[in-house]
Amino acid sequence: MLTDKNDDVHAHDFQSTKTGNWLSDISALKTIEFDRAPYQAVLMRSCATKDDFTPARLQLGKSSDGFSFQEYITKVPTETIRDPSMIKTENNGYYLIESDGLYQTFDLMNWKNLNWDWKSLGFDSVWAPEFFRDKDNQVKVVISQCEHNTTPHGTEMAPFSIYTYDFDIHSGHLSTMQKLTPARGTVFPEKLIDPDIKFDAATNLYYLVAAHYTADSESTIDLYCSSQIESGWTQVPLDFDSHTINGSVYEAPEIEWIENQWVLYVDAFSNPKFNNQDGILFSPITPLSSDGVNITESLKPLKYTSPGNDYTPWAICFVH
């Protein structure tokens, strides 16, 4: 028996999706089970070996607090999935985008590969595309893109630029490419990857968080803000380095509104050269502000429960 405060909504959702086919109706119930969790996320888990860390698989997680996640058991694409991001649409479907593909699902079990040809964008490499919504609730995608790919994988790929695209939730098409530009008289670092954009209604500003490689195997997290998406980005002071561990590398940052506060999530892994993957860390941060943002607690590991498995997820991206 449903007992949470959203029972009526979930019951209505199920009634509206009933088809008379018991397999379809079970799929609808499974989707509602995922939706009713206060927080849902897609994660990347390694299927790596000591000599090859490239393969990765999609993982779904649900949480009541945004800090401890339980694996959502379902079927996921069998292909390698890197840096996934997922968004729910108004027709109760989902789109999943990742560094090599775009998928659509209505039941979190059957995934349609939309055969996204990212090379048609005119770049040699696309890293960590991510959905976000602008202040008018329109769906967009932000991507770090490289014009000249010098290695198959690694931070030697430079320079990167950050672009946004409009996303059509009906057709699954990306359009209207815009290159993000910093405020006049400033420049973005060349090795700025894994961008995440959020709009903060309290300050009426967009915030961009991204991993910044300061050397071949050294990185930090940068934060920027702007009143508009395409231009005017200025760097926001963030005291990230004072909370890091020497020798660790940090990627895939996310800022999320969790339990009435902003929280920073990062994917942390230690050298040598990316084979030691440590997992996801998080900490609450002070309210977003153009004047500066502070990390309020020591970075802590994200808790993730997966029956019968002992792997640690890498990057996390919340579903919106």
Image (cartoon, rainbow, N blue to C red):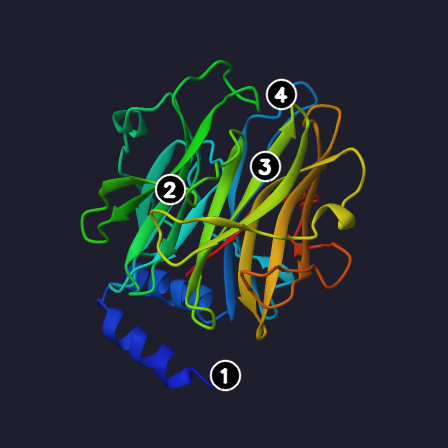
| Residue under numbered circle 2 | 180
Instruction: Say which of 163 and 125 sits in front.
Output: 163
Cα gap from disc 4 to disc 1, whole angstroms: 44 Å
Q: Is residue 256 left or right of residue 138?
A: right
Viewer-closest of 89 and 16: 89
Residue 178: which quarter of the image? top left
Return the x and y of residue 306 as percentages of the image width and height.
Answer: 64, 52
Q: What is the spatial separation of the Cα atoms under label 1 and label 3, in whole angstroms?
A: 42 Å
Residue 4: image tag: 1
* Mark 1 or mark 2, whichever is nearer to me: 2
Residue 276 percent location from the top left of the image? 73, 31
Q: CA distance from mark 1 to mark 2?
A: 42 Å
Q: Which badge, 1 or 3, is on the more N-terminal residue?
A: 1
Kind of element beneath mark 2 = loop
Mark 4: amino acid: Asp
**Left or right relative to 116: residue 291:** right
Q: Earlier in the sequence, mark 1 or mark 2?
A: 1
Q: Which mark is residue 212?
A: 3
Q: Which circle's residue, 4 or 1, is located before the other in the chain?
A: 1
Asked whether the residues under the numbered discs 2 and 3 touch, taking CB atoms below 8 Å apart as contact, a structural biologist would say no
Query: Mark 1 or mark 3: which is in front?
Result: 3
Q: Which residue is mark 4?
A: 52
- Give, as a three-letter code, the residue at label 1: Asp
The three-letter amino acid code for the residue at tag 3 is His
Q: Secondary structure at mark 4?
A: loop
